[in-house]
Image (spheres, grey):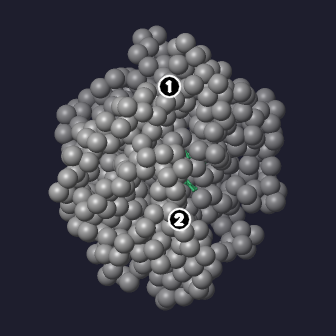
């Protein structure tokens, strides 16, 4: 059962201006605590400085009590020493593009972008790069492209999002079906622990910093009696950004596996060594049309055998919106389609790509209603245009409907994909909530943008009921609520529904070992007492 609601709602459903949020409890530790020993960066409490840090992408918003802008890793260490000795809560922050509210909260918002942008150092021979955490994906890829390399995990926010955020959320993208999520590409991390200790940790290392060794010994002792049952009931999904990655850690013993995906709750990352992949030489795309949803689900399983670079889906809701609204959808959208799959191949030669496309056509013969191949780059770009056509149409929708991301990232085992789409359509239909559904079919990961009528009485309660029902449904399908966006504050209250009490107790043991006083992003991944998903909804 979730605790009683206590969100900060403006009666007409519109967003509160941050300056007019309902009053908070009077405690304001930061302005009363005096200077931070050894800290050379900015620590600001004035409202104008804090306001931009109260907002992020997604539906949650909370004004922090202060903003800290450390100038380097030693500064982060000074801030954490101070925070741990004064029980000040910290909310690490990159570009603020994260969806579920891991980047907003009370306490001190820590800007890990502004001064963490040293140019990436690319080692072309070893295909690695050392990146400062404020570096964006686009910046690293620009530096790596000189060597015909790239970071192959591609969140669509890559122009803006930082490596700190990608590491913290274990971000993914349309190419994750081929390359995996961020975790698989991280070799080493520089981290500041909750007590201000700076540590470096690399995969496979034997010599550990004594503080990190002590933490991991505590984690190992806590996990040992539960390891088998945690692994046995772990969701069998291809990608996951929910909870702490216990099976990965139990397999490798690498602290990197726990820290990646920990959403700023176990330590603040300041730099990383990442692996790079060669840029593909040739690409080819096919669009597969389906009038039957189950057939689309079955086709995805077959397509995975061909190792596609992407396998994306738009469902009927998305197709109908674009068909009705877009002046030039980029591809002729027929009536009556249940889904379209976008399947792309990458290879070293055009010949290999052509062979993969031919194999695809043979593989889905009799399953897909129609297969159209985009032979050249111009046509490929036009076809991809369909996949991006919904966002401007949603933005143009007038009236009281607002697109909100609150069930936007569920992931299920691929064989359950069609069941998951049906579940979403049913729940949304019962609440008469129009939505567009699309996402990374090859990974079983769907994005959902419901269009919420904020003039409807009781809409917030309805949203929460939907979140709870979808989470229960996703759990029953063997999935999690976050394929790539993380849990944040939005999904922390659902964590036990997904993982069960025993695994969540193990999560708590990990958190307690790394952050015994709970100063690092409290309420993210693990809920605080009485926390509810939409407590901090901005509308
Ligand atoms: C239009 C749009 C498209 C998107 N598409 C994708 C997509 O395709 N795939 C995908 O995975 N995500 C996507 N996202 C979500 C988001 O962009 C990613 O999760 C991104 O990696 C967040 O990076 P950020 O720098 O904005 O981090 P923030 O939003 O600032 O922070 C995200 C989380 O990371 C923590 N954090 C940040 N820096 C650090 C650090 N240095 N140390 C410790 N913790 C830290 C924060 O506390 C927070 O919990 C999208 C978002 C938008 C708005």
Name the residue beneath numbered marker 1: 278
- Which image quarter holds the C terminus? bottom right
The answer, for residue 131, to whether it is visible in the render is no
- Which image quarter holds the N terminus? bottom left
522, above or below 180, in the image: below
Residue at horizontal 19 percent and vertical 57 percent from the top: 367
Q: Secondary structure at mark 1?
A: strand
Residue nearest the observer in this picture, 288 or 43: 288
Q: Is 407 left, or right, of 88 in this rendering?
A: left
Residue at horizontal 71 percent and vertical 68 percent from the top: 18
184, above or below 484, in the image: above
The answer, for residue 19, to whether it is visible in the render is yes
106, above or below 403, in the image: above
Q: Secondary structure at mark 2?
A: loop
Residue 484 is situated, as x and y percent measured from the top left of the image, at: 44, 48
Residue at horizontal 42 percent and vertical 42 percent from the top: 284
Q: Is 223 left, or right, of 111 in this rendering?
A: left
429, above or below 67, in the image: below
Residue 309 is situated, as x and y percent measured from the top left of the image, at: 39, 40
Residue at horizontal 49 percent and vertical 26 percent from the top: 277
Name the residue beneath numbered marker 2: 389
Do the residues under discs 1 and 2 have CB atoms within 8 angstroms?
A: no
Any atom of ligand 1 within 8 Å of the CB at mark 1? no
Residue 234 is situated, as x and y percent measured from the top left of the image, at: 25, 43
Q: Is 413 left, or right, of 529 in this rendering?
A: left
CA neighbours of label 2 inside 10 A, class few (<14), some (14 to 19), many (20+) = many
CA neighbours of label 1 inside 10 A, class few (<14), some (14 to 19), many (20+) = some
């Amino acid at each position: 059962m979730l605790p009683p609601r206590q969100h900060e709602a403006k009666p007409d459903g519109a967003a509160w201006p941050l300056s007019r949020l309902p009053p908070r409890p009077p405690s304001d530790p930061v302005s009363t605590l005096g200077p931070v020993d050894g800290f050379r960066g900015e620590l600001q409490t004035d409202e104008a400085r804090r306001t931009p840090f109260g907002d992020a992408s997604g539906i949650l918003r909370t004004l922090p009590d202060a903003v800290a802008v450390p100038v380097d890793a030693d500064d982060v260490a000074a801030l954490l020493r101070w925070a741990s000795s004064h029980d000040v809560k910290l909310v690490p922050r990159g570009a603020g593009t994260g969806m579920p509210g891991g980047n907003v909260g009370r306490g001190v918002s820590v800007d890990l972008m502004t001064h963490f942008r040293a140019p990436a150092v690319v080692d072309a021979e070893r295909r690695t790069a050392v990146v400062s955490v404020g570096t964006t994906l686009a910046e690293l890829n620009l530096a790596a492209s000189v060597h015909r390399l790239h970071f192959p995990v591609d969140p669509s926010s890559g122009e803006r999002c930082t490596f700190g955020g990608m590491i913290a959320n274990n971000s993914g993208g349309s190419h994750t079906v081929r390359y995996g999520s961020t975790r698989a590409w991280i070799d080493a991390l520089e981290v500041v622990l909750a007590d201000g200790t700076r540590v470096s940790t690399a995969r496979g290392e034997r010599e550990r910093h004594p503080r990190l060794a002590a933490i991991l010994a505590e984690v190992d002792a806590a996990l040992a009696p539960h390891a088998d049952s945690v692994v046995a009931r772990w969701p069998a999904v291809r990608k996951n950004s929910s909870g702490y990655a216990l099976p990965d850690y139990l397999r490798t013993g690498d602290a990197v596996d726990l820290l990646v995906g920990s959403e700023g709750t176990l330590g603040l990352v300041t730099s990383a060594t990442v692996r790079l992949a060669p840029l593909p030489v040739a690409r080819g795309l096919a669009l597969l049309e389906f009038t039957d949803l189950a057939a689309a689900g079955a086709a995805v399983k077959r397509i995975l055998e061909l190792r596609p670079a992407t396998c994306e889906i738009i469902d009927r809701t998305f197709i109908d919106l674009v068909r009705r609204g877009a002046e030039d959808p980029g591809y002729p959208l027929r009536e009556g389609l249940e889904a379209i799959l976008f399947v792309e191949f990458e290879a070293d030669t055009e010949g290999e790509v052509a062979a993969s496309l031919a194999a695809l056509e043979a593989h889905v013969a009799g399953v897909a209603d129609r297969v159209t191949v985009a032979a050249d780059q111009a046509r490929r770009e036009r076809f991809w245009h369909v996949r991006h056509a919904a966002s401007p149409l949603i933005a143009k929708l007038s009236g009281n409907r607002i697109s909100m991301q609150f069930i936007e990232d569920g992931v299920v085992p691929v064989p359950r994909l069609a069941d998951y789409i049906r579940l979403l359509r049913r729940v949304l239909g019962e609440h008469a909530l129009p939505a567009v559904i699309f996402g990374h079919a090859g990974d079983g990961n769907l994005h959902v943008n419901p269009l919420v009528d904020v003039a409807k009485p009781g809409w917030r309660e309805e949203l929460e009921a939907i979140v709870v029902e979808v989470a229960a449904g996703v759990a029953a399908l063997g999935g999690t609520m976050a394929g790539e966006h993380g849990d944040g504050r939005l999904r922390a209250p659902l964590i036990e529904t997904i993982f069960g009490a025993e695994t969540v107790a193990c999560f708590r043991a990990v958190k307690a070992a790394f952050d015994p006083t709970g100063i690092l992003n409290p309420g993210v991944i693990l809920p605080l007492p009485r926390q509810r998903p939409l407590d901090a909804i901005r509308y």
